[in-house]
């Protein structure tokens, strides 16, 4: 791998132990993937998961802080595992241990000491700072990464925690995968003939597409005659593709920046096979997500965190109705959107109707910790990613459109 003189010096320890660790980690990563060089990045997005990092992750952060390490590019933090503003309630009523809460707070403190901004967001591209077209970044949340690639035309791989951290400290990342133009070309054609109308529809399309071809090297392109998708619809399409298919890039002809046409999205070499998703195919995705009981424990709007207009959409869907006494309606937002919702009066009005906000988290990381203590089992959501993720945590999930989610929250049962 070609390195600059400065990068070679860091690898040899000229910049101190922290930079030596960071450069060595990303150099070995790049060698594994045959990256020809490093590329400078505009920002990093770090996902410090308390459960996954464990003691080894904590020890690494402590050592880097002791060595005086600092992020040299803007660094954004992914959601934490605990809504610290509700920590006492979560310990008392939701089964979280005080030790886990303390660990999560310490992990967050160490990250801030390293220079990361306390964004606690998986939609930093929507509520903090979007990446520029063609800009190389090192983002660690899969949903944020696919959105950076597809919605903005920036360039990033799915960075693991250590690689995003190393990239933040060095300001560079190995140039492989989605950093290369040839890997971003569409190689899976999907014609949409199902008239998607809302966020849940686009998530269901992603779930269907993920069943066609999984793998990081698969880049779907969607085309056809349909109403132009909103940003939030494209956001859900992306996070669900990352969840169901492991995809890091996609195109929607006429809606994403690298797909002004089908030919452009495919780099001039359009695949011969055309896959068509029909209305019947779309409805089949919703039908396969049906719990064994109609009784609803949770209605959750998350994965990814919501924008303020999505929060307003929940209020509209509820139509003044109160949440049923046996149901928890949870809305996951980052601190930026929570502040917007507060100022708009949305927080007060929704909480008066029985909704709860989970701030700085995205619920699915907390969900496994809650399940046994609360007895929660049945979840209704309009997020295909959440439906997929929570199923692996032992929940029975129902992917439904917004109106049905609102009805389930207020009636306490899922409509047949």
Image (cartoon, helix red, strand yellow):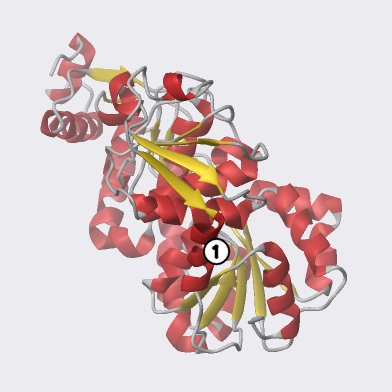
Helix, strand or loop at label 1? It is helix
Can you see residue 239? yes
Question: Splitting the image into 4 quarters, where does residue 41 fall?
Answer: top left
Q: Measured from the top left, where is residue 3 in percent x and y?
A: 17, 15
Front residue of 63/256: it is 256
Q: Please indicate, yes or no, whether residue 364 appears anywhere in the rendered image.
A: no
Looking at the image, which residue is at 55% across and 49% down? 236
Residue 105 place in picture, x, y as percent:
47, 60
Q: In the figure, is residue 312 to the left or right of 282?
A: right
Coordinates of residue 17 in the picture (x, y in percent): 20, 33
415 left or right of 6? right
Which residue corresponds to the image point at 31% horizontal and 61% vertical from the top-left?
52
For mark 1, what is the residue?
283
Residue 199 or residue 268, whichever sits in front: 268
Q: Residue at x 48, y 50 (%)?
A: 277
* Image quarter in which the C terminus is found: bottom right
Seen at 53% across and 61% down, the residue is 280
Percent position of residue 29, x then y: 17, 34
């Amino acid at each position: 791998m070609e390195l600059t003189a400065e990068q070679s010096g860091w690898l040899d320890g000229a910049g101190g132990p922290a930079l030596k660790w960071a450069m060595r980690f990303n150099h070995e990563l790049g060698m594994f993937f045959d990256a020809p060089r490093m590329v400078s990045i505009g920002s990093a997005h770090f996902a410090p998961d308390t459960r996954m990092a464990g003691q080894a992750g904590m020890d690494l952060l402590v050592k880097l802080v002791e060595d005086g390490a600092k992020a040299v590019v803007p660094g954004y933090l992914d959601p934490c595992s605990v809504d610290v503003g509700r920590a006492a309630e979560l310990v008392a009523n939701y089964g979280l241990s005080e030790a886990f809460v303390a660990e999560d707070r310490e992990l967050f403190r160490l990250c801030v000491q390293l220079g990361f901004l306390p964004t606690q967001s998986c939609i930093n591209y929507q509520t903090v700072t979007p990446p520029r077209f063609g800009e190389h970044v090192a983002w660690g949340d899969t949903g944020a990464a696919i959105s950076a690639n597809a919605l903005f035309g920036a360039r990033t791989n799915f960075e693991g925690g250590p690689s995003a951290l190393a990239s933040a400290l060095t300001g560079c990342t190995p140039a492989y995968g989605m950093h290369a133009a040839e890997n971003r070309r569409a190689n899976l054609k999907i014609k949409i003939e199902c008239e998607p109308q809302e966020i849940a529809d686009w998530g269901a399309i992603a779930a269907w597409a993920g069943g066609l071809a999984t793998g990081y090297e698969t880049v779907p392109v969607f085309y056809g005659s349909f109403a132009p998708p909103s940003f939030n619809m494209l956001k859900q399409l992306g996070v669900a593709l990352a969840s169901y298919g492991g995809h890091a890039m996609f195109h929607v002809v006429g809606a994403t920046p690298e797909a002004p046409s089908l030919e452009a999205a495919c780099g001039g070499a359009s695949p011969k096979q055309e896959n068509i998703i029909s209305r019947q195919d779309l409805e089949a995705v919703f039908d396969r997500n049906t719990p064994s009981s109609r009784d609803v424990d949770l209605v959750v709007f998350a994965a990814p965190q919501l924008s303020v207009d999505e929060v307003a959409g929940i209020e509209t869907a509820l139509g003044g109705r109160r949440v049923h006494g046996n149901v928890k309606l949870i809305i996951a937002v980052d601190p930026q959107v929570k502040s917007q919702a507060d100022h708009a009066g949305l927080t007060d009005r929704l909480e008066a109707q029985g909704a709860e906000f989970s701030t700085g988290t995205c619920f699915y990381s907390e969900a496994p910790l809650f399940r046994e203590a609360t007895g929660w089992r049945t979840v209704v959501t309009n997020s295909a990613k959440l439906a997929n993720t929570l199923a692996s945590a032992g929940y029975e999930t129902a992917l439904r459109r917004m109106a049905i989610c609102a009805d389930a929250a207020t009636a306490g049962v899922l409509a047949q």
